[in-house]
Amino acid sequence: RRAAVERFTPFLPASPSVAAMVATGEFIGRLGRVDTAPEQREVDGITMPFVITCAEPSASAAAVSAWVAANQAEIEAKLAAHGAVLFRGFPLRSAADFDAFVCSFNGWEDLSYEQSMSFAVRKRVANRICTTNEGKSGGLVYHHEQAQTPLWPSKVFFCCEKPAEPGDGGATGLVHSALVLERLRAKHPHFVDLCEREGVRYTIFAGPEQDPTKGAGRSWKSFFHVDTREECEARMARGGWEWEWGVGPRGAKLGPDFLRCVTPRLDAVKTAPGTDRKCFFNQLIATIANALEFSHVGKAGGGFDPLKDVPSQEGVDECVRFGDGTRVSLEVLLDAKAICDELALDVEWQVRALSCAPSSPRATPPSHPPRHNPSHPIRRQAMWPSSAITR
């Protein structure tokens, strides 16, 4: 399950050696023991993620909330320095416990699913908590959360109630997006130049009803938070979107209540706050999967797997273009995905494990995601990027 937060924490210089902190038995407050995990990896001189294990697993939810409130500044500093924080062994036995944990962070405003512009079909399970994705068409690919829209969160929490069975997948991959950009600039400088100079415009295909058979199956009513076509058009007009009704990919004729809409120009590269370091902040790699899903708009499922199947260049063209109309190369996107795979570290989920990361490139590796994995996004305070990608 997930939760999103609006306020952004700046990226700070690396903290002292995590190994030294563990060796000296360093604590964050009374409950938080600085720890290590097999998933940790040295990324550009920074240990990612920072791991905090609960020193008293029998502590009450109220005690955990009080610990968060008392140590928020230090937790924020670790998040900023390391790109992600992994909490393990904390007594979060329900969505309500997870919600109480998230709400303990003062000033981290909620970006609710109802307010968000996520493509995913999600279900609310507690106050600020919803499921990650009800989609059934396959795994996810690397993306910055909701970066395909003008509204995106600065941080995302994930909490695991029940992990996948051993050998059945269920990890969440994290990638440092500044490193992805550096690799892409070295290999595809013209592509990165277009990202920086022209930005991107995404095309979205949506029906009037939620389609839980797809990972990107949200209806236009839910996506734009409206009830009628007239309300939808008014909202799109205010935001600088373009649209037409009854048209699918490649000009396919659909029902009159199916929507094809194009975003205003959005940045594809952003600079992390507090630094001069640029990040590959977009949903371009996820377009590999979205192109497959949108090509089946109006059809249940689709009989494809975004982790294995690859769209055509024409399919990508239907879903994204640079701001000047130039096509986005599928070959480069596949290279970008391979770079993420090479740089990624996979956080293996355990019962009651919880992580907080910037709205970063992330993804769920093959095959199945962790069951009952709730999450919560945190609203952004300004249009600032995060430094990591998830899948």
Image (tube, grey):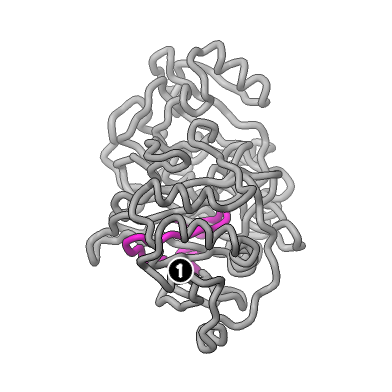
Q: How many marks?
A: 1
Left-right relation of 333 to 136: right
Give the residue displayed 29% in from the left and 43% down from the top.
Answer: 304
Vertical comparison of 373 with 274: above or below: above
Name the element at disc 1: strand
Give the residue displayed 51% in from the left and 13% down from the top.
Answer: 229
Give the residue displayed 40% in from the left and 71% down from the top.
Answer: 56
Q: Is residue 358 magenta?
A: yes
Vertical comparison of 383 with 351: above or below: above
Please say whether residue 319 is visible from this viewpoint. Answer: yes
Give the residue displayed 38% in from the left and 43% down from the top.
Answer: 131
Q: Is residue 331 magenta?
A: no
Query: Crowding near pointer 1: few (<14 within 10 Å), some, many (20+)?
Result: many
Quadrant of the image for the C terminus?
bottom left
Where residue 292 appears, x then y in whole percent?
39, 40
Left-right relation of 279 to 172: right
The residue labelled by disc 1 is 345
**Between 92 and 14, the one nearer to me in the picture:** 92
Where residue 71 appears, x then y in whole percent?
59, 64
* Span of residues in magenta: 335-363
Where residue 310 appears, x then y in whole percent?
38, 48
**Between 299 and 64, the one nearer to me in the picture:** 64
Q: Quadrant of residue 182?
A: bottom right
Please say whether residue 180 is visible from this viewpoint. Answer: no
